[in-house]
């Protein structure tokens, strides 16, 4: 997950003149306290202090927090987490304050990170933090994930609450080498527990999903979700590894097909935070996110990419829409798709229209919170733990949830094949590369050479591991705060974009 993705996306946004249609902001660094709203304190402290030079002194923590392999330690790791999280939190705040109807943070969308561990090159779950921020003002939030990998970290965080409905469209099942596609979760029968029962919607798909099948199913599922759940805000993760020819993906979506999903969500006229995610054929990621930025500001972008400093990455045709689909056979039959659609619709029948969910006192603003103030707030949360109606069920209830082998899957290596960095070709901004026309090398049904997407079973070491899977939603409303108005019916967006 190279930073060049962000640089190239930024350059395309600028060269197409999209910056003239939106407000751009330098992302504010998330504070330690903000990240600890979801993640446990010891884990954030570990990310703050560990470096490539001292990691040998953190041997136990490296194992405990699942760091290494596909979640390596690198220089600037903690700042990277603060940038990604800060951008998503601030995007949510702009929605809450009514400053934007759509807010974008392409450096966000790290959907695999768990409360107490890293996963799939995701260290801090900026999505969960953004959703928790939105829940201060909105009774219900819908999370939509179109990354090729299941959004397991976000689903786990809100698995036991009815205030968030998660919807994930993803590759699921065994690959040709016999391993489950990463992360091994997201089956149809994972649909939430306790108050969150039926509030986790999974759309598990096989390899080769094309525009026609994917977009039709997406619209059908999402329209039913929006009709039944009626959220006050949307968070959409736009992982670009669901594009055709992605180095680690195995779908066949075109850039326009991927963008149709984003455009469809915009038409619902509900305040929305739009985030990035996966994507490992770097020029195509930039193409995709620049195009979707254009869709969100109603800009019609020409196929020919304007001349600019990074134009050489788009050789030989210098086009925004290279032919990247139809490289793999679609393994999803119409019967498969109909079965999934029927199962999802049956699940959604269990949700009452516009469910009335209790909202609770909002935590104090974190910016500038004193140490004494933070301690006082934590004491208040401890007092609220006795009231199960005032929080997402944690403690013994969460610990009692059976941890199946499938639910405990994690990546052996999502971003590397053995010792080879899959996007190492892009270490230098002036390098020539065979993928510049949008094609990936050695694409097979598993997405990349040598067993990408592999997962192996890892049993939970203690019952308390299950406790750390859920977000603490105690106190996410303040009766003194104004209600955020809905987006204008005409869909005209005052859009803010977090820069790099």
Image (cartoon, helix red, strand yellow):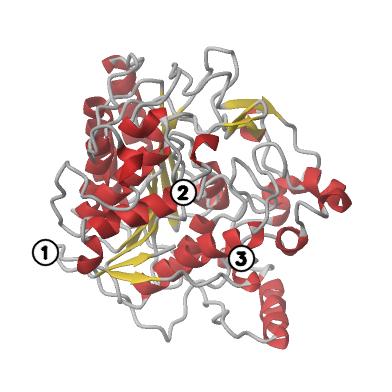
- The earlier-in-sequence mark between 3 and 2 is 2
Cα–Cα span, label 3 and label 1: 36 Å
Q: Find residue 35 and name its label.
A: 3
Does 121 sit left or right of 256 as displayed? right
The residue closer to the viewer here, 162 or 25, is: 25
- Residue 368: x and y in percent read 60, 85
- Residue 412: x and y in percent read 66, 30
The residue closer to the viewer here, 181 or 250, is: 250
Quadrant containing the C terminus is bottom left
Does 200 sit left or right of 291 as displayed? right
Question: Which residue occupies 15% across, 55% down?
Answer: 299
Q: Which residue position holds label 2?
A: 4
- The earlier-in-sequence mark between 3 and 1 is 3
Q: Residues within 10 Å of mark 1 (few under 14, many from 20)?
A: few
Evaluate whether residue 331 shows in this view: yes
Cα–Cα span, label 3 and label 2: 25 Å
Q: Which quadrant of the figure has residue 269?
A: bottom left
Q: Nearer the viewer, mark 3 or mark 2?
A: 2
Cα–Cα span, label 2 and label 1: 36 Å
């Amino acid at each position: 997950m190279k930073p060049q993705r962000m640089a190239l996306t930024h350059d395309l946004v600028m060269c197409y003149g999209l910056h003239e249609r939106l407000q751009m902001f330098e992302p504010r660094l998330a504070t330690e306290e903000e990240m600890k709203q979801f993640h446990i304190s010891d884990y954030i402290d570990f990310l703050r202090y560990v470096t490539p030079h001292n990691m040998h002194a953190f041997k136990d923590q490296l194992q405990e927090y699942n760091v290494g392999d596909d979640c390596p330690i690198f220089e600037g790791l903690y700042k990277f987490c603060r940038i990604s999280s800060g951008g998503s939190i601030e995007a949510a705040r702009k929605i809450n304050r009514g400053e934007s109807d759509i807010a974008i943070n392409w450096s966000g969308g790290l959907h695999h990170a768990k409360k107490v561990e890293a996963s799939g090159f995701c260290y801090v779950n900026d999505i969960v933090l953004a959703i928790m921020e939105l829940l201060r003002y909105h009774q219900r939030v819908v999370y939509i994930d179109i990354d090729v990998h299941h959004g397991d970290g976000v689903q786990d965080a809100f698995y036991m609450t009815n205030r968030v409905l998660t919807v994930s469209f993803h590759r699921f099942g065994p690959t040709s080498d016999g391993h489950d596609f990463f992360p091994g979760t997201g089956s149809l029968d994972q649909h939430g527990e306790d108050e969150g029962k039926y509030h986790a919607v999974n759309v598990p798909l096989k390899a080769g999903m094309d525009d026609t099948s994917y977009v039709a199913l997406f619209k059908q599922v999402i329209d039913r979700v929006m009709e039944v759940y009626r959220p006050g805000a949307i968070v959409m993760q736009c992982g670009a590894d669901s594009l055709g020819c992605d180095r680690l993906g195995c779908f066949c979506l075109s850039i326009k097909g991927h963008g149709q999903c984003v455009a469809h969500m915009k038409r619902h006229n509900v305040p929305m935070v739009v985030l990035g995610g996966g994507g490992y054929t770097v020029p195509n990621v930039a193409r995709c996110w620049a195009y979707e930025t254009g869709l969100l500001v109603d800009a019609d972008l020409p196929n020919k990419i304007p001349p600019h400093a990074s134009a050489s990455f788009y050789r030989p045709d210098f086009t925004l829409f290279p032919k990247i689909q139809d490289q793999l056979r679609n393994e999803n039959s119409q019967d498969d798709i109909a079965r999934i659609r029927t199962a999802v619709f049956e699940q959604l029948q269990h949700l009452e229209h516009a469910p009335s969910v209790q909202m609770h006192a909002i935590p104090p603003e974190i910016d500038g919170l004193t140490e004494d103030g933070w301690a006082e707030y934590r004491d208040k949360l401890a007092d609220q733990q006795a009231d199960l109606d005032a929080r997402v069920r944690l403690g013994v209830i969460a610990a009692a949830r059976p941890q199946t082998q499938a639910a405990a899957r994690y990546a052996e290596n999502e971003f590397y094949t053995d010792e080879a960095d899959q996007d190492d070709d892009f270490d230098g901004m002036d390098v020539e590369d065979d993928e510049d026309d949008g094609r990936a090398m050695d694409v097979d049904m598993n997405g990349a050479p040598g067993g990408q997407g592999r997962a192996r079973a890892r049993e939970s070491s203690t019952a308390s591991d299950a406790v750390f899977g859920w977000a603490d939603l105690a106190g996410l409303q303040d009766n003194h705060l104004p209600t955020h108005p809905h987006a204008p019916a005409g869909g005209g967006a005052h859009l803010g974009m977090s820069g790099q």
